[in-house]
Image (tube, grey):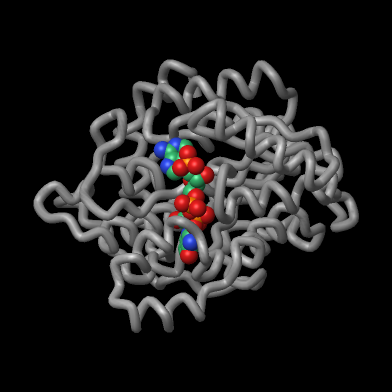
Amino acid sequence: MNNKDWNIVGKNCLITGATSGIGKETALSLARMGANVIFTSRDEKNGEKTKMDIVNETKNSNVNYLICDLSSFRSIRELTEEFKKKYERLDVLINNAGVLPQEREVSKDGIELNFAVNFLAPFLLTKLLLPLLKQSSPSRVINVSSSMHTEGEIDFEDLESAKSFDKYKAYSQSKLALILFTKKLAKDLRGSGVTVNALHPGVVDTEMTMKNVRKMNPIASFFFKRTLISSKEGAETSVYLASSPLLVDVTGKYFVNKEINNAHASTEDTVLREKIWLVAEKYTRNFIDIIGN
Ligand SMILES: NC(=O)c1ccc[n+]([C@@H]2O[C@H](COP(=O)([O-])OP(=O)(O)OC[C@H]3O[C@@H](n4cnc5c(N)ncnc54)[C@H](OP(=O)(O)O)[C@@H]3O)[C@@H](O)[C@H]2O)c1
């Protein structure tokens, strides 16, 4: 495929968690560029408000939302069924939604929340939408990870932090797992026209960050806040990965500041990639079986 063949205008872009922060700015930018934006919201009220905000600001009326709670496998499955009913193509899937809970919480399926929402949800959503992504190829999957994956380690003895919970450890593990998934899927999909990349958006002034800043002492919080970038800046790499014609054949990479960067060395470990993939398959198997992928 030639670079010039990728044009974001009229492309169906599904973005998870676009009701605030980086996701909302990603949706705004892509709508401004002329994409058909479909985003997920956990409830109608927030979905409707976000949709109106984006439509009013961009004058692009091709903005819609679907209800999904990514902490529920059932809800993810319903989202994919609804999406397939409503849309014939999926050109760009942006797995953006994420959590960094202060205490140990569990998903609707009883799974530790970081592991469930930051890793298993994008794993299942992407797998269920893969037939449509392949059918729509060239198409792109973009996984919003974090530089904190470098602090992560996959603790196969305690994947869900049941023995002891450290919020940053659980978050970092989930973001590392997401990159391992990205790299394995990219390899498996070589030649299919579906690319898969991951990114770190920067350290961004969003609610997720502010929840942690509020726990800092006033001096640390004052200095830390000065280092934060805006949500709009935080969305730039996601938007670049979705829209740039230069990236047609780029897959399995990790981006920071719109440039290819080295992810942690452990993400090159193909045995580790395989192992975490099998874990995710085991967790999500029932739902994948039902849908027949
Ligand atoms: N902020 C940073 O500095 C930073 C740094 C590195 C990586 N990231 C990553 O960037 C992504 C976006 O984060 P953000 O900073 O923009 O956070 P945010 O402002 O807290 O937004 C998170 C989004 O995810 C949605 N979400 C959360 N739990 C969900 C669930 N169970 N089901 C469906 N949607 C859910 C939220 O929806 P509701 O409105 O319904 O809550 C919201 O739209 C995340 O993956 C995060 O890990 C952020």
Residue occupying image coordinates x 74% and y 60%: 247
Residue occupying image coordinates x 42% and y 79%: 224
Asked if residue 265 can be seen in this view, the reply is yes
Asked if residue 184 can be seen in this view, the reply is no
Find residue 211 and report its image quarter: bottom left
Find residue 286 and report its image quarter: top left
Residue 12 on image: x %, y % = 74, 36
Along the viewing direction, whichever of 81 and 99 lies nearer the viewer: 99
Along the viewing direction, whichever of 168 and 215 lies nearer the viewer: 215
> Which residue is outermost to the right?
4
Residue 110 on image: x %, y % = 24, 32
Residue 235 on image: x %, y % = 63, 60
Residue occupying image coordinates x 35% and y 27%: 285
> Which residue is outermost to the front?
218
Residue occupying image coordinates x 58% and y 55%: 22
Compared with 181, 176 (above or below) is below
Compared with 291, 205 (above or below) is below
Residue 182 on image: x %, y % = 50, 52
Compared with 37, 201 (above or below) is below
Q: Is residue 186 left or right of residue 210?
A: right
Find residue 212 and report its image quarter: bottom left
How many discs mark residues in the rendered view? 0
Along the viewing direction, whichever of 170 and 252 lies nearer the viewer: 170
